[in-house]
Amino acid sequence: FRGSTNITCPAPPPGLLGDDVLATADGSKPRACFQIEDVTTQLTMSQRSSVYSSTNTNSYTGTAWTPAGGSLLITFVVGTNSSVADPTSVNGHGVAYTKVSLASNSVGTTHAMSVWVAKAGAAPTNAAATATFAANGTGAAVIEYEVIGADVSGAATAAIAQAVTSNNTGTSASTTITGSASNGAMYFVTHLANEATAANTGWTEGSDGNFN
């Protein structure tokens, strides 16, 4: 079954097994029993905050909002500098985010892309997510999502079934993921050109912006 809640199988009726027959058909014999939990919770993924900044600084902050208790928070960050570097930390709503492990974080020689996740907890605060770098950069984007209905029984990173990356050239970007149809999916694209982009059919665009 899927989920973290313990399930107790009910006692089966008498006569279920071949040796539980006739006078001994009282339902007391050992037998195998399992139960499948029907997961009906639907994921709701919403883009809540975004900032695109060309300011020369080491800290970039989105807009304040209040997450739902028990939700999963996902923040995409891309920063620019003379060399590729991820933020040293992302914080917001009274919690610290954990960086998701990616196979590659570089976009060209000056841009770094990273994904950060956190559990909102029972009583998240009205605040903004802040990405902090070790040194001043020349710009950054901080885009925050809220996911309601995710399995947050473990660590925040455990709620991410898979995280894949790819580098593409030309006018389109693509990558391949596999998994259950009941899982939600989102993708983040950094395009090194100041021009409009469009999501593919079947996808909903959460945020689109630019910075130097």
Image (cartoon, rainbow, N blue to C red):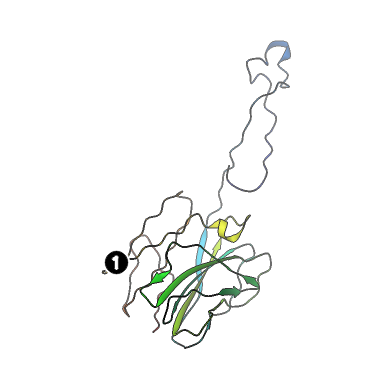
* Residue that numbered label 1 is attached to: 172
Q: Can residue 53 be seen in this view?
A: no
Q: Between residue 177 and residue 64, name the one nearer to us.
A: 177
Residue 74 at x, y = what percent? 53, 67
Residue 59 at x, y = what percent? 54, 83
Q: Quadrant of residue 197?
A: bottom left
Q: Is residue 95 left or right of residue 137?
A: right
Check disc 1: other Cα within 10 Å, few if <14, some if 14-19, many if 20+: few
Residue at the extreme front:
83
Q: Between residue 89 and residue 191, name the one nearer to us.
A: 89
Q: Is residue 87 left or right of residue 22?
A: left
Residue that appears at 47% across and 69% down: 114
Residue at the extreme left:
170
Residue that appears at 40% across and 83% down: 211
Above or below residue 155? Residue 85 is below
Q: In this view, does 110 lie to the left or right of 77?
A: left
